[in-house]
Image (cartoon, grey):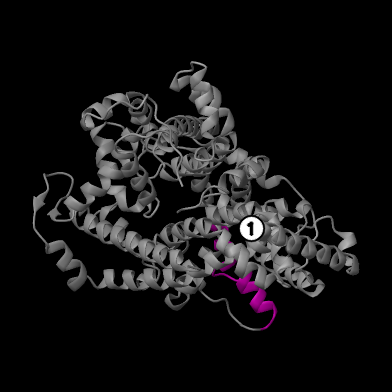
Amino acid sequence: MTNVSQEKQVQDLKLQELELYKQQNRKFKKYKSVRLSRSLAGDIFLIIFLLLFGSFSAYPLIFTIANSLKPLDEIFVFPPRLFPRNVTFDNFVDLFNLIGNTQIPISRYFVNTLTITALGTLGHVMLASLCAYPLAKHRFPGRNLINQLIVYSLMFSAAVTTIPTYMILSWLSLIDTQWAIIIPAFGFPLGIFLMRQFMNTIPNELLEAAKIDGASEYQIFFKVVMPLVKPAWLTLVILLFQQLWGTDGGTFIFTENLKPLSYALSQIVAGGVARTGTASAVTVIMLIIPITVFIINQSRMLDTMAHSGLK
Amino acid sequence: MEKVISVTQPKKKKGILKDIKQNKVSYTMIAPYMLVFSLFTVIPVLMSFALSFTSFDMLQAPKFIGLENYINLFLNDEVFIIALRNTFILAVITGPISYIMAFVFAWLINELPKKFRWFMTLIFYAPSISGSAYLLWQLIFSSDMYGILNSRLISMGIINSPILWLETPSYALPILIIVQLWLSLGVSFLAFIAGLQTVDRTLYEAAAIDGIRNRWQELWYITLPQMKSQLMFGAVMQITNALGIAVVSINLLGFPSVEYSGHTIVTHLLDFGSTNSTRLEMGYASTIATVLFFIMLGSNLIVQRIIRRVGS
């Protein structure tokens, strides 16, 4: 007892000391959150550092956006300028004209990409959440083994499994259909890993209370768990979206009117130097949607990633 | 660490079969995902391993040839040795640097006022958002005088004629490293930012009371130990990425690149095993895949062990 009260006294003393220290430092009045360990020089250094590397990170993107807004003669001006003098949307118009002249209308490619992205994302979020729930919250034989397998599967890339994947898809006669991209996306390991980690944080009392009220496991899953893990499934949506949006069908789809947008656009980019402006327009279009999706969901994604840790 | 509940009332255990029956709901819930996961992750790894001991062209049944593929790969395939060397150089440089970069940027962004954080996060994460954004480095390294780098150097008077950046073997690896670092912050960067935001604020106050006076001490004594699990996750992501470099090489340097200067294990694998390739030596390609699998898994497990030891 005495020990505890002594400790508390020491703690109180230290807190008083802290208050004094805060009062002496005028700097703290400016900031809401009080941090003792910050120096002004350090702050300046960190801002310069971030700006420097931030511009390295952003430069290629800014340059591409600028290029897509330049008329052709400005793209080939020497030495090149970063920002366009006469802003024009010609490149985008050219792009739509080019696409309009192809045998298969652009809307076809767009619908293909949309189908792949929507079905793949939806299926993955459903299956991965449904599987993550028992893995996080139930005890059953084989659970630890599966959890281990999922962690190990994060440790190698898809390149390792290309050949057998192709063989399996062809046994299932899925080659040259959009399902060849959609179904493997359901099994994306990072998604279920993040989902399971997030579900670990749900308090058991909540689930037990629902069970006492007579809810079945499926009711608990849909009515209690899924609303609670909204940040996690939004994160899965973003990750899957990023993956599937840019897919070009690879070696799995070869019928022309089943191919996704990314393929059609890469054909235009392949048109050579004269298409530099159009190529930039293509890149801007392919980037703008995933970036918007990310901006909207950024805070939820960070909520999820906070639980991504490996033990 | 794990809190679990039983679906059913715990009864007397009568062997594993009974146990499985009791947990029928759990198994039905995991079944759909596990089916896809087994079909496209677990089984392919096992198949790849089995095929690596065969000669197989996808037309006829695989023929068992023992260790011949492995012997050829390590002793008779000079290009594989080049690929191995390039992969290790790339991984040893881009792996640790991108890992440290991801952490340092996340840490610094976390020091900024809240208003600016989302914007800086976007700036650093944007390159990893779109799968094909690295293509715009083609414009930068383009070999004519309109290439951004060439024109800058020419107008500054450093060089007189354009340099063939993407076609010169000795520039291949440095270019790959730069582009790979640019797009490699990825999910581990987000994990770090998120991890930093969840470190208990009161720990910092307590530390200030205990005499920690600058951000370096704070980082070392409080932040890093608190973030250990995110650091492990980030390491897995960065290592797997760094060893799997291929797409950037194929698209920027060509396939195959000049004198195999940008050849990696994965591009070597695609050379033999892609269904577009004329070789169709699936057995041999599976050998490459198996070797890659063990390299990736091995280096991950070693690094995990090292990080786990830090601070204990």
Viewer-proximal residue among B106 and A225: A225
- Placement of B212 over or under B240, stated as above or below: below
Residue B135 falls within the magenta-colored stretch? yes
Viewer-proximal residue among A235 and A249: A235
- Tell me where the magenta segment starts and ends, as one range: B134-157
Outermost residue on the front side: it is A2
Quarter containing the C terminus of chain A: bottom left
At 16% across and 62% down in the image, what residue appears?
A: B69
Q: Position of residue A162 (x, y in %)?
A: 31, 48
Q: Position of residue B164 (x, y in %)?
A: 51, 74
At 66% across and 60% down in the image, what residue appears?
A: A3
Is residue A161 shown left or right of residue B120? Answer: left
Chain at tag 1: B
Tally of marks: 1
Viewer-proximal residue among B309 and A47: B309
Q: Which quadrant holds residue A59? A: bottom right
- Placement of A306 over or under B39, stated as above or below: below
Q: Which quadrant holds residue B30? A: top left
Is residue A73 shown left or right of residue B90? Answer: right
Residue denoted by label 1? B124
Report helix, strand or loop for mark 1: helix
At 63% across and 44% down in the image, what residue appears?
A: A294
Task: Specify few, some or many for label 1: CA neighbours under 10 Å numbering under 14, 14-19, or 20 or more.
Answer: many
Quarter containing the N terminus of chain A: bottom right
Q: Position of residue B307 (x, y in %)?
A: 46, 65
At 33% across and 42% down in the image, what residue appears?
A: A146
Please, what is the three-letter code of the amino acid marked with disc 1? Answer: Phe
Q: Report if residue B127 is visible in the image.
A: yes
Residue B4 falls within the magenta-colored stretch? no
Q: Report if residue A75 is visible in the image.
A: no
- Placement of A284 over or under B167, stated as above or below: above
Dominant SS in magenta = helix
